[in-house]
Image (tube, grey):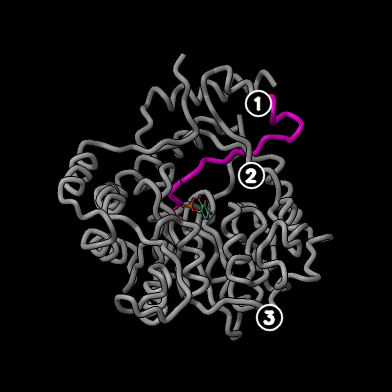
Amino acid sequence: MSMIPIARPCLGDEEILKVSEVLRSGMLAQGSLVREFEERFAEYVGVKYAVAVSNGTAALHVALLAMGVGPGDEVIVPSYTFYATASTVILSGAKPVFVDVTDNGTMDPEDLRGKINDRTVAVIPVHIHGHPADLDSIRDAIGDREVQVLEDSAQAHGALYKGRKVGSLGEAGAFSFYPTKNMTTGEGGIITTDDEELAERARAIRDQGQTAKYLHEYVGFNYRMTEINAAIGLVQLSKLDEFNRRRKEIASRYTEELSGVVQPLPVAEWADPVWHLYPVRVPPERRDRFVNALRERGVLARPSYPMPLYRQPVMGRISDRRYNYLSVLFEGVSYEGVETPNAERLIRELVYLPIYHCMKDEEVDQVISAVREASKEV
Ligand SMILES: Cc1ncc(COP(=O)(O)O)c(C=O)c1O
């Protein structure tokens, strides 16, 4: 029996050819292909500037620093997301403040409203599973405060919010090109923005804080993207719309053919999601057995992230030097008593079904029959 993975990258001869050209050229470090990739990606998202970096975590980290986020600040993030959404806030020296999510898994604007205060400098909505967060309601909750929005778009390349691409709606967007994402560069990330100064700062911070050769105006990193990664990215970007079309086709099949069998998450009327993941809700007492029953049928589904981020061990040790080299900035910070009930419930219930753009029809068939059988069995 062939096993169907939860996700996988889909690469073809074009990527291999383009990478071979780079290897033959001998020009491996950030150069003209990275610039071309940035221009094309900015154009795709509909922003003026894009700054490519070594991964999505670096994109969030650099974006926060380029936005001026630092010690003493608070940044609001959803509690249900990948760790890097919050860890990069800590890396910037600021304190992550966790808010709940709505039924579609994205930031709850009402909970956000109650948690914004004078120390809040930024909010990071996450377009989780490829489903856009409700940006207008988030802006509404922010009101006329000076709070910047950084869209974590790591899972949502090409997703639309009210007809506009995610990554073009906040002061900045951050994308990941990890192999299982909707498009890949191997490892990679990019920052999108319309703000020229933010883009200039981001370019410097990713490259040793340099504004000219050996002129270091900022404390920076080596977070550069290589020409090899950009070469893969240029080809993948040209296929992204087709990849997303196929993901939507698979998601529609799951939604229609599994209706009444498992419960998918709702899609908001203003959302055109790109289905990085296909999550379904399964009662917690049945979930492990359900995942195992799928595995026995060759389907490698996966339960949700295991806990809301404020319960990750590091958050309880945030002021302990052994676990956080920036501990002095976090003295007295505690996440005890933080609760986000909707996120906690989703985390107990969610199972992600396999979805990737080169999934064959037979594989989709196999997932659908496995889910039908497994839900009868458990
Ligand atoms: C929501 C979210 N944010 C950030 C990241 C970090 O991206 P990367 O793995 O490329 O560092 C990821 C992906 O892994 C993600 O899913």
Q: Which residues are magenta?
A: 272-289
Q: Position of residue 363 (x, y in %)?
A: 42, 24
Mark 1 residue's CB less than 8 Å from ligand 1: no
Q: Is there any visible trace of residue 130 in the rendered image?
A: yes
Q: Nearer the viewer, mark 3 or mark 1?
A: 3
Separation of residues labelled 3 and 1 (CA atoms): 44 Å
- Magenta stretch contains residue 97: no
- Label 1 sits on a secondary structure element that is helix
- Specify which label sits upstream in the sequence, 3 or 1: 3
Q: Which quadrant: the C terminus?
A: top right
Q: Nearer the viewer, residue 2 or 221?
A: 221
- Label 2 sits on a secondary structure element that is loop
Q: Is the residue 84 above or below the residue 124 in the image?
A: above
Q: Nearer the viewer, residue 258 or 228?
A: 228
Q: Position of residue 125 (x, y in %)?
A: 56, 64
| Left or right: where 105 falls relative to 357 | right
Q: Nearer the viewer, residue 239 or 371?
A: 239
Q: Residue at x 39, y 61 (%)?
A: 53
Q: Residue at x 16, y 46 (%)?
A: 24
| Left or right: where 115 falls relative to 226 | right
Separation of residues labelled 2 and 1 (CA atoms): 16 Å
User: Which amino acid, mark 1?
Assistant: Phe
Crowd tier of the residue under label 1, counting other residues whose Cα lies within 10 Å: few below 14, some 14–19, many 20 or above = many
Indicate which disc residue 119 carries: 3
- Specify which label sits upstream in the sequence, 2 or 1: 1
Q: Nearer the viewer, mark 2 or mark 1?
A: 2
In the rendered structure, are the residues bearing label 2 and label 1 in contact, judged by CB atoms less than 8 Å apart?
no
Q: Position of residue 344 (x, y in %)?
A: 73, 49
Q: Is there any visible trace of residue 163 in the rendered image?
A: no
User: Which amino acid, mark 3?
Assistant: Arg
Indicate which disc residue 305 carries: 2
Residue bearing mark 1:
290
